[in-house]
Image (cartoon, grey):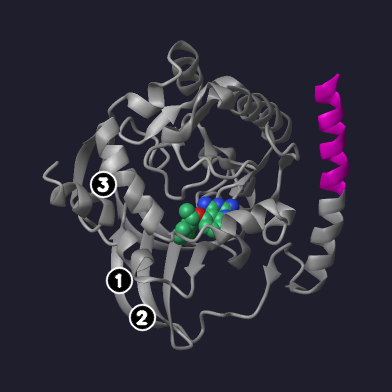
Amino acid sequence: MADNATIENNEKSSNELSKKKLKRDLDVEDHGDGVECGANILSGFKTTRVLRESAREKTIFIHGKLEDQEAVVILEKTPISEDSLSELFSGSRMKLDMKNDIYSTYQLQPPAHLNKIKTTVVCPATEKHVKKYQSQEIFLVKETEEDYNNITLPYIQQQSFSIQWVFNILEKKAEADRIVFEDPDSQLGFVLLPDFKWDQKQNDNLYLIAIAHQRGIKSLRDLTPKHVPLLKNILKKGEETIMQRYGLPAWKLRVYIHYQPSYYHLHVHFTALEYDAPGCDVTRAHLIQNVIQNLQLYPQYYKTQTLSFTSREDDGLLSKFKDAGRL
Ligand code: DD3
């Protein structure tokens, strides 16, 4: 019963959200192909250098300047969706590269609206953002309870990682039209929305994040049995919403918490099981189901257990572990 009420509330609020989106759409041009075209803010982008590129991932990470501000731009060729195939075959130009027996290769030039590059811009970018995208040697850190208290906790407290963007989402100051579900309860509530990494074009690489309304839960280390109802609520309603909205059942989802997280405010990752999402391996991801059970079995679990995680060469936290002689 309570669940139905939440679902109805959500339908109502998503209607309101569609209206908001409609209004926003009027502020930008639409060339009739459903693509919103704003001004090209990247026309004046000056490349400083390429931070990383991957032919396999079809991505390039560029450091540069946008109107005298430091910027990081990420370009990524988007996956080809099944829905676009008939248009792709009928509407493209093709240039033969080579032909040999029964084998031939071509360069296919798709119609403009099927030829998109997902672009992420961070501007103004800090030194930390620039470093984040450079290839780096990685190390496994085994963090004991003492390490956490003496090294990690002081480090995260003195770092003023800005999580303004998280508060903007919770307060509907940003991305409000992208919210897929919200439970507004101050203790058990959360906001569910697509992660930046997902363009929402196909379920293959589905990636959503649930951000807790409750503030002050920095990471896995802060979780105690009193948070179990919150975690269960996020898991249950997150799974239900993803089933309703994207048709993916719970058994096709990987639901987990990162340690270390990228930002120190409780959030839960929902990714498509068949998608090898960045950070979904055992050196970073903790399945929420296991987290719940560990807390129920042993209330002090995340406070006391040694937790392993990977850290990159340039990470300030890694330097602290090295300084302490722990690596
Ligand atoms: C981030 C981790 C953080 C660069 C980049 C992303 N999903 C976000 C702001 C808004 C978001 C996210 C930090 C930052 Cl590209 C530096 O992620 C975000 N909004 N992951 C959504 N929906």
The disc, 2 or 3, on the residue closer to the chain's N-terminal end is 2
**Which residue is pictured at 44% across the width and 88% down the height?**
68
Location of residue 294 with respect to 42 vertically, above or below: above
Does label 1 or label 3 sit earlier along the sequence?
1
Residue 97 part of the magenta-drawn span: no
Q: CA distance from mark 1 to mark 3?
A: 22 Å
Q: Please tell me which residue is depicted at 73% across the width and 62% down the height of the picture.
A: 34
Query: Could you tell me if residue 212 is visible in this image?
Result: yes
The image shows residue 77, relative to residue 296, as above or below, that is below
Q: Amino acid at mark 1?
A: Val
Disc sitting over residue 50 in the figure: 1
| Residue kind at label 3, given as amino acid type | Ser
Mark 1: few/some/many CA within 10 Å (<14, 14-19, 20+)? some
Residue at which label 2 appears? 47
The residue sitting at 58% across, 54% down in the picture is 166
Quadrant including the N terminus: top right
Give the labeled residue for mark 3: 311
Would residue 267 be found to the left or right of residue 14 on screen?
left
| Element type where label 3 sits in the image | strand
Residue range in magenta is 1-15
